[in-house]
Amino acid sequence: MMQLYGALVLFLTFSAACGLRCYSCTAADPKSCTHTEACSAVFNRCYSVKIEGIAVNKGCLASQACIPPITCCESDLCNSAVPTGPGVIVLLLSSALITLFI
């Protein structure tokens, strides 16, 4: 059990130390955006902005620029239309732990 917690802490620390990763694209269909980029240190948010009927734009952004209609988030690959990345893995892992002990 302690090894599992240790692995989880190590995983979360490693993902935070590698910098933020965001989806980056300009596409008509948000689900077709599959290109990712590692954000530079000045960009601490992933963003997504939808231009009605035309396209969606995604990438890295500084938190000060996160104003409507721009939607921002602060975890790896959080600007996807499909849930992915460490957040989903942590959610699945915590669900498995709860299932084992309840």
Image (tube, rainbow, N blue to C red):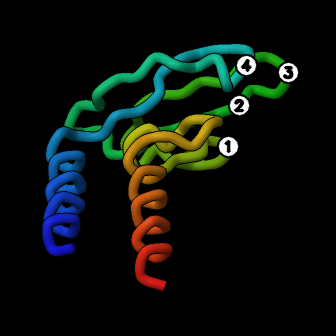
> Which residue is denoted by mark 4 in the rendering?
29
Query: For the residue carrying disc 1, how many other residues have a C-alpha within 10 Å: few (<14), some (14-19), or many (20+)?
Result: few
Answer yes or no: is residue 31 visible.
yes
Placement of the N terminus among the 4 image quadrants: bottom left
Q: Earlier in the sequence, mark 4 or mark 1?
A: 4
| Relative to 70, residue 92 above or below | below
Return the residue nearer the eye: 86 or 4: 4
Query: For the residue carrying disc 4, how many other residues have a C-alpha within 10 Å: few (<14), some (14-19), or many (20+)?
Result: few
Kind of residue sitting beneath label 2: Lys
Q: In the structure shown, which secondary structural element does the residue marked by tag 2 occupy?
A: strand
Residue 69's label in the rendered image is: 1
| Relative to 28, residue 63 above or below | below
Q: Earlier in the sequence, mark 1 or mark 3?
A: 3
x, y percentage for residue 28?
Answer: 73, 15
Q: Earlier in the sequence, mark 2 or mark 1?
A: 2
Seen at 49% across and 67% down, the residue is 95
Return the residue nearer the eye: 5 or 85: 5
Disc 4 to disc 1, C-alpha distance:
18 Å
Disc 2 to disc 1, C-alpha distance:
8 Å
Residue 87's label in the rendered image is: none
Disc 4 to disc 2, C-alpha distance:
10 Å
Seen at 52% across and 47% down, the residue is 72
